[in-house]
């Protein structure tokens, strides 16, 4: 039987459409949750790399700017917030964690990418690391240059984050952070430079791997408890206990601690000098705080290293908790979550050893 030209065209189109559908079927389904930040920022000119406005570009525009993503994943977007991340709050985190858990509970979602400002990206990622109840990949991504800049880093960072979130190798490694072709663990990573592209670092412990040539390369995994293995559950919470940070420095006084006590804080993290040392002017204030039922955690402002329990202060006697090697801002997050479970300082110390 002879095929007419139009019949041939029809069946060719059918074969192509089936192949395309089959290919799309094999790609991972990745949901991008957009929260704002510089990755969604715009500047007055293409050379504006500081002094731009964060959180102006919507999620669909971010996705449309990287059509290459369609070849590596079935991508869909959702605008969760549109803020600069210095304005991130506990309430934002609760909303985000609940949404991520909802999405990862669906069979048709293989991974989640969250676009985020870089200023507090390390905090949101650690919060999610402790509250997401799934082994599916969750990747936080941002950029140091706004979307309008020459050599903006947002598009390539987003492209890599989508590949990472769809990568089976990323499963079960906790919440990940990916910028600048690197993969980092939520617990370890910090923004270390105000403006350079290589700002995200994990002091002492190093990153987990690289993004290279459209592929994730892992070299290690975080060893502390996280995600599906964590004991925290925020599904029914609409607020978190108030925990604040007081900073240590030469000539420090007790004014800040007293102000927090007056404001009714539930926990305080002391970002001490060195190995979490307490000045003679501040120690009595923290002792008063503890007597009033406020949980006190000793952290360090140094940026790396372990705060030794019963080292620079006798934690057993003072009933304080040592922060291990968590930065003060990450210790604040663990303390908030710990206080949703217990008011016993030994239990809180256990959590600081495990998470
Ligand atoms: N201030 C911005 C933010 O965190 C900085 C950035 O995204 O790089 O939202």
Image (cartoon, rainbow, N blue to C red):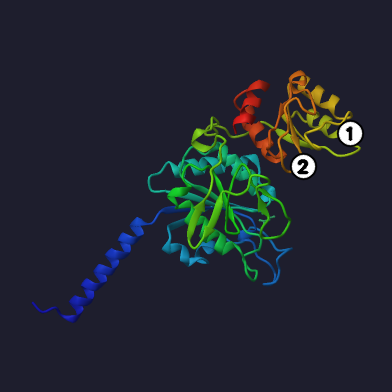
Residue 192 image offset from top left, x and y in percent: 71, 51
Residue appearing at x 70%, y 60% in the figure: 196
| Residue plotted at (75% across, 28% down) | 264
* Mark 2 or 1: the one toward you: 2
Using a 10 Å C-alpha cutoff, classify the residue at mark 2 as few (fewer than 14 neighbours), some (14 to 19) or many (20 or more): some
Q: Nearer the viewer, residue 281 or 36?
A: 281
What label sits on residue 253 in the rendered view? Answer: 1
* 90 in relation to 197, above or below: above
Q: Which corner quadrant of the figure contains ligand 1?
A: bottom right
Q: Is residue 315 above or below residue 105?
A: above
Q: Secondary structure at mark 2?
A: loop
Viewer can see residue 244: yes
Q: Residue 302: which disc? A: 2
Residue nearest the observer in this picture, 316 or 127? 316
- Residue at image x 62%, y 40%? 91
In the figure, residue 260 lies in which quadrant? Answer: top right
Q: Can the viewer see residue 80 in this picture?
A: no
Q: In which quarter of the view is residue 293 placed?
A: top right
Q: Which mark is residue 125?
A: none
List x then y, in percent, for residue 106. 40, 44
| Label whose residue precedes the other's in the sequence (2 or 1) | 1
Q: What secondary structure is found at the residue carrying circle 1? A: loop
Return the x and y of residue 4 as percentages of the image width and height. 15, 80
Q: Is residue 320 left or right of residue 281?
A: left
Give the CA distance from mark 2 to mark 1: 19 Å
The C terminus lies in quadrant: top right
* Image quarter (top left, top right, bottom left or bottom right) of the N terminus: bottom left
């Amino acid at each position: 039987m002879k095929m007419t030209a139009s019949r041939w065209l029809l069946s060719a189109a059918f074969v192509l459409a089936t192949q395309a559908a089959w290919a799309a079927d094999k790609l991972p389904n990745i949901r991008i949750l957009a929260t704002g930040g510089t990755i969604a920022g715009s500047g007055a000119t293409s050379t504006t790399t500081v002094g731009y406005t964060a959180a102006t570009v919507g999620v669909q525009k971010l996705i449309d700017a990287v059509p290459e993503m369609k070849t590596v994943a079935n991508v869909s977007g959702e605008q969760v917030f549109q803020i600069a991340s210095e304005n991130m709050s506990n309430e934002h985190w609760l909303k985000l964690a609940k949404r991520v858990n909802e999405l990862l509970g669906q069979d048709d979602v293989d991974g989640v990418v969250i676009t985020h400002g870089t200023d507090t990206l390390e905090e949101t990622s650690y919060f999610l690391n402790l509250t997401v109840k799934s082994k599916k990949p969750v990747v936080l991504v941002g950029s140091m240059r706004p979307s309008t800049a020459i050599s903006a880093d947002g598009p390539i960072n987003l492209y890599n984050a989508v590949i990472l979130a769809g990568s089976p190798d990323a499963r079960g490694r906790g919440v990940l952070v990916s910028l600048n072709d690197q993969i980092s663990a939520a617990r370890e990573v910090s923004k270390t430079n105000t403006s350079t592209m290589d700002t995200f670092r994990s002091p002492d412990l190093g990153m987990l791997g690289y993004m290279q040539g459209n592929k994730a390369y892992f070299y290690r995994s975080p060893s502390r408890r996280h995600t599906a293995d964590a004991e925290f559950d925020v599904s029914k919470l609409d607020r978190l206990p108030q925990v604040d940070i007081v900073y240590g420095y030469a000539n420090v006084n007790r004014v800040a601690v007293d102000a927090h006590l007056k404001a009714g804080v539930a926990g305080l993290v002391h970002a001490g000098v060195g190995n979490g040392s307490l000045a003679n002017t501040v120690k009595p204030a923290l002792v008063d705080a503890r007597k009033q039922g406020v949980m006190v955690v000793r952290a360090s402002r140094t940026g790396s290293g372990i705060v030794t329990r019963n080292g620079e202060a006798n934690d057993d006697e003072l009933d304080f908790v040592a922060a291990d090697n968590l930065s003060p801002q990450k210790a604040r997050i663990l303390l908030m979550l710990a206080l949703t479970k217990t008011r016993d300082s030994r239990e809180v110390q256990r959590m600081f050893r495990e998470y």
